Image: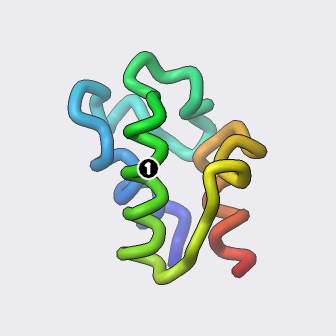
Amino acid sequence: MKLNEFVDAFSTQFDETSSKGINSSTRFQELDEWSSLTELLIIVMINDHFHTQIFKKEIRSVSTVEELYNLVAAR
């Protein structure tokens, strides 16, 4: 898994936020569209695309898309 692949998969989980507005340094929890539903979609995406299980508390422990990627890649 590469960072750019993760960012692309991550950005597809948002309907109203442009994928061009999401990059590795995006503080995703500050996005207007971020919600508990989006958080669940991200968990499912990580499980489906990267075959890794992650929990809400872990997502909440990081700030940027790259930090989330590093968390997933470390598994």
Q: Image point 70% across, 64% down: which residue?
A: 70
Q: Image point 40% across, 40% down: which residue?
A: 38
Residue 75 screen position, x and y as percent: 70, 81
Q: Image point 77% across, 44% down: which residue?
A: 61
Q: Residue furthest top?
A: 32
Q: Dot 1: what SS? A: helix
Q: Nearer the viewer, residue 58 or 70?
A: 58
Q: Quadrant of residue 49?
A: bottom left
Residue 11 screen position, x and y as percent: 36, 45
Q: Quadrant of residue 45?
A: bottom left
Packing grade of label 1 (10 A; few <14, some 14-19, many >=20) is some
* Residue at which label 1 appears: 40
Residue 52 screen position, x and y as percent: 55, 78
Residue 43 screen position, x and y as percent: 48, 59
Task: Using the image, determine if residue 14 lies above or below residue 58.
Answer: above
- Circle 1: residue type: Leu
Q: How many marks?
A: 1
